[in-house]
Image (cartoon, rainbow, N blue to C red):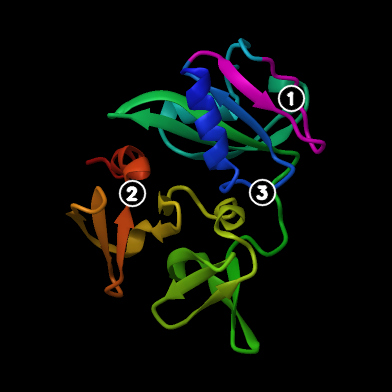
Amino acid sequence: MEPKQIEEIMDIIKDFFPENTSIAISDTNEYLYYQPSKKVDLKIKPGDPIKDGSAAHKALTYGQKINTYIESDVFGVPYYGMSIPLIEEGETKGAITAIFPQKPSPFLTNYITIKIDDCWYPIKHDQVIYLETQLRKTFVKTMNREGYHRLNLSDLELFLAPDSFIRCHRSYIVNIDYIDEVQPDSHSTFLLIMKDGTRIPVSQRYASYFRRSLGF
């Protein structure tokens, strides 16, 4: 991976991860870039090999996004990691890993509380059809309700189970259980028809990851 590519990746992921997040970028064997935060520092240096059992190692091994708690026997300090494989033309090229001291927990992890007018409603994760970035908040859609959550899409992504929810676009995360149909589309790579009738694009950036996650 070239230095210019790393710079481009860093410019993009600033919009995807919360502030005060340590960021590591690797190829399939070693770390290429590391930006520590004040909250947690794994002391990674460019050129260090990817350690077995780390979040990056798991993402590269399984070829999908990993949200996991890593014990201190890997880096000497425990951390919570979210690692996303970088896939190009079906081949894994590396991974981006966000590193936190612990999994954030501002609300019960089985629920998302949305605001509708002047009231708040707790929604179970399995009732969510999709989430969409709108005006620096997150629009949450279910079969029966729709409203807004105060956190942005990237923050909320940390709380969603990776085996049920998948990011398909910079502005969208969908619940796989509510995908009714996947269509080819000329304006994006695919078009998702959700069970409520909503049409959601899969952007080119997420196409390989999306196909690999769903196995087609």
User: Residue 18 got which mark?
Assistant: 3
Is 5 placed left or right of 40 in the picture?
left
Relative to 60, is 202 above or below? below
- In primary-sequence order, the first of circles 2 and 1 is 1
**Occupied quadrant, residue 96:** top right
Q: Main secondary structure of the magenta part?
A: loop
Q: Position of residue 104 (x, y in %)?
A: 71, 51
Give the farthest residue toward the bottom.
118
Disc 1: CA contacts within 10 A as few (<14), some (14-19) or many (>=20): some
Relative to 71, is 111 above or below? below
Q: Residue at x 71, y 46 (%)?
A: 19
Q: How many numbered badges does the structure rendering display? A: 3
Q: Residue at x 19, y 54 (%)?
A: 185
**Occupied quadrant, residue 172:** bottom left
Give the farthest residue toward the right.
38
CA gap, disc 3 to disc 2?
22 Å
**Magenta residues, as a range?**
29-45
Q: Amino acid at mark 3?
A: Pro
* Residue wearing tag 2: 203
CA gap, disc 3 to disc 1?
18 Å
Disc 2: CA contacts within 10 A as few (<14), some (14-19) or many (>=20): many
- Tag 3 secondary structure: loop
Q: Nearer the viewer, mark 3 or mark 1?
A: 3
Q: Amino acid at mark 2?
A: Ser
* Residue wearing tag 1: 42
Q: Position of residue 188 (x, y in %)?
A: 26, 51
Q: Position of residue 41 (x, y in %)?
A: 77, 28
Residue 31 is covered by the magenta coloring = yes
Residue 56 is covered by the magenta coloring = no
Q: Nearer the viewer, mark 2 or mark 1?
A: 2
- Tag 1 secondary structure: loop
